[in-house]
Amino acid sequence: MSVSLIDIDAATYEPHPLHSAERVWSETNCYVDLWIEVLHAFGFDPLASAAFTLSSDFEGDQWTFFKFPLEDLRAVYGIDVNEMNVWAPIETHIVEQLELGRLLTIEVDSWYLPDTAGVSYQLDHVKSAIAPQLIDPGARRLGYFHNAGYFELSGDDYDGVLRRTDELRDTRLLPPYVELVKLEGARQETASRLTEHAVALTREHLSRRPTTNPVPRMRKRLGADIEWLGSQPLETFHRWAFGFCRQGGANAELAADYVDWLALRDDAAIGPAAEAFRELANATKTLQFNLARAVRGRTVDVEAVLDAMEGHWDAALAPLVARYG
């Protein structure tokens, strides 16, 4: 017998507009993308809790792996998320928690996720987070949120992703990291209350913002990495660029959408910050393209792009700090 929380079909599911193909960065990272779709599917506005984008920083060798903070999900939607002790087969935990009206987020191997075909499915063992909302053990069928949508898998992929094969049951393998998502206290706030929560979170995350513009630090690290990258295979560049470019650019684009959302509800004067964040997102994508050419041996000048990124960062933060700082 199948167990599910909501009646949705992977074939007809419509992702949130934050995952439209027209975006500069159509995906952010597996955790943020997953939560965008979970919130969307359950009737919540994911932008209401996106203030965390305002505290992202360059961490020495990469941008912050940005995430929806669990305390923000609780404050805005009443959704309570905590790490879960995995003491039984993961299939058992999924069934039991879905029957209790709860979700799990689970770190799995993308080798078994058919929605990653052409990237990692049956090609590479890559950690990624999913949130199953439908399971049918008898039919070996799983419906799950992942990246930019909702998908289903079955058969051997079901056995692999849930570690049901003898090889994957090996007790020497660490259990997956699992979070328990309790929906019992979830609530739909009024528009005014959502804005109040967003303003409070904006002030909080701005207080955590980098103390200096992060782009000069990014520039310095690039100078140290660029020659080494030229000697590495293209796969290494892609792994490096995920943190060095994509996490900064995708965060900036999501920040732009959040500021647009907040400007409509609180203060239109912060609108220019959204445009600056969007320019930063575009410039970071240009940087990634140029660096990809550089590691292939072509001569490129990235200094002008980095100069622009530095200016966009300052222009984005200034209106926000003036209003909420």
Image (cartoon, helix red, strand yellow):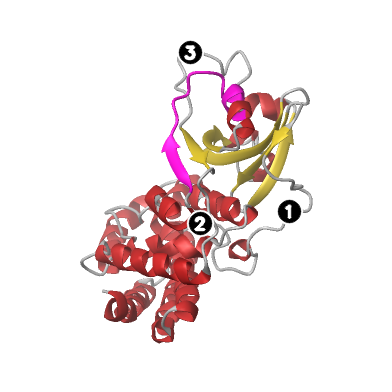
Considering only vertical position in the picture, is 78 above or below 90? below
Task: Give the amino acid type for the residue marked by disc 1 in the picture.
Answer: Tyr
Question: Where's residue 184, x and y in %?
Answer: 53, 43
**Residue 49 visible, this angle:** yes
Label 2 vs label 3: CA separation?
33 Å
- Of labels 3 and 1, the one closer to you: 1
> Circle 3 — which element?
loop
**Labelled disc at residue 171:** 3
Tag 1 residue: 13
In primary-sequence order, the first of circles 2 and 1 is 1
Q: Is residue 117 left or right of residue 215?
A: right
Considering only vertical position in the picture, is 169 above or below 95? above
Compare residues 46 and 99 and report the one nearer the observer: 99
Label 3 vs label 1: CA separation?
37 Å
**Labelled disc at residue 250:** none
Tag 2 residue: 28
Provide the residue span drawn in magenta.
79-94
Question: Where's residue 73, x and y in %?
Answer: 45, 52
